[in-house]
Amino acid sequence: MERANIKETNLLFGNLYKRESTDMVVLHHTGGNDIDASAEQIHGWHIKNGWAGIGYHFVIRKDGTVERGRPEWAVGAHASGENDHTIGIHLSGDFLQAKPTAEQIEKCAMLIANLSADYGFPIDREHVLGHGELMATDCPGANLQTLLDDGTITGKANWYRYGAAGQAEIVPKVLPEERIWQFLKGKGLNDYAAAGIIGNLYAESGLSSTNLENYYECKLGMSDDEYTRAVDSGEYQNFVYDRAGYGLAQWTYYNRKAGLLEYARAKGKSIGDLDIQLEFLWQELEMNQSLMKKLAYVDSVREASNAILFDFERPADQSEAVQSIRERYAQDYYDDFALMNKLLLEEEDNMRYNSVTEMPEWAQPTIQKLIDKGLLGGTGGKDKLDLTLEMIRVFVINDRAGLY
Ligand SMILES: [Zn+2]
């Protein structure tokens, strides 16, 4: 995101106080005369009012220069009753008669984008206001207020924050299947077992941790998200006993739903939180010792998928048709994750290292020593090394064993 350049003014202030929260920007104008007031000039006026110094945090001049007013961390003096959570931006001019310049509008939007990112508030009309929306005043002038009301300023600010220039900041979303696969592999399961579990979860919920069984969406008149929110807030009290399948594993019976609810509450997380459900699922699996034993030895996707189907999910329909559908889902995940990982590992194994600098750091001293001794790289180390990672590992192990 592009950042507005702030011109320091080094003004001297009386007592200032630290602002504890920041969730709003308030816009002001000079008013009275359409002059290009500077931060220093306004500082003088506000000191004459008996204040600690300029009350606004920023002053945007007509040419778009952004000047520092009161330090950004300090409680301002610009919006009576709202100073303890707001930042004041002053645009120089009288916008009852004149219009803000194009430069002022752009810098104002950029500054709002910067502040919203720094403090974590959204850029909308609840968080970006004109002075007159908080109290009876004609500040910041109708010609500036209009630009707020028609969405010009918040629209531009959102563009500065998220638009073309800001795209690199958008964090790539981790797909639930990736998260679930990592979780299961992290528990030490083999690839077949992990694929068998994830295939069954897909059949149950499409891997959506907020999935409410469709029949109950109609019956209760709530969507997945509405149900989740209502359970979290306590507004809906019948989660445990309503028999509605919910979440990754479509937990249905009262004792399992009670366990899930209790677990989420104890962790202070939403009932629909993916990680919470994975941890709870793992607890349930571990309690089923015969299943865990089977999973430790499965050596096909079908075997793993059926173990979960018969010993864990136990849906009403366990026919051959259901078995093969779940096996196919599991096979898809196996192909996606297990085979892909193997290919990546093989690629790593096939990679050839030709110089010391391109090797992993832990291997460099050993390989350099072997070159210095004339054991690798020909006379004077001039030949291509042509080492695989496996060969490098062997050299390092031998070196640590004192062979060189
Ligand atoms: Zn004002």
Image: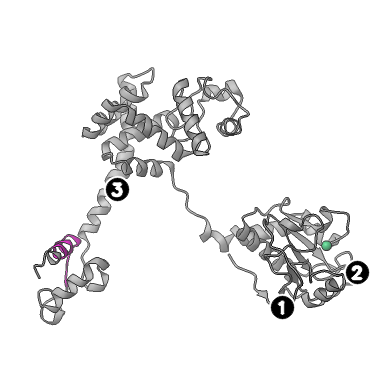
Circle 1 residue: 9
Label 2 secondary element: loop
Label 2 Cα neighbours within 10 Å, binned few <14 / some 14-19 / many ≥20 = few
- In the picture, residue 331 is in which quadrant? top left
| Up/down of 212 relative to 79, above or below | above
Give the alpha-carbon distance from disc 2 to disc 3, as whole Å.
69 Å
- Reading the chain from its start, which is encountered first: label 2 or label 1? 1
Picture disc at residue 98 = none
From the image, tell me which residue sits under label 2.
32
Q: In the structure shown, which secondary structural element does the residue marked by tag 3 occupy?
A: helix
Residues at circles 3 and 1 in contact by the CB criterion of under 8 Å: no
What residue did someone put label 3 on?
340
Q: Position of residue 182 (x, y in %)?
A: 35, 44
2 vs 1, front mark: 1
Mark 1 neighbour class, 10 Å CA radius: few under 14, some 14 to 19, many 20 or more: few
The residue closer to the viewer here, 166 or 395, is 395
Q: How far separated are the C-alphas under marks 3 and 1? A: 58 Å
**Please, which residue is most extreme toward the right here?**
32
Residue 146 is drawn in which quadrant? Answer: bottom right
The kind of residue tagged 1 is: Thr
Dots 2 and 3: beta carbons under 8 Å? no
In the picture, the quarter occupied by the N terminus is bottom right
Location of residue 83 with respect to 273 vertically, above or below: below
Task: Residue at 74%, 77% (x, y): give it.
Answer: 11
Q: Residue at x 31, y 33 (%)?
A: 196
The residue segment tinted magenta is 385-397
Query: Which three-letter amino acid code belongs to the residue tagged 2?
Result: Gly
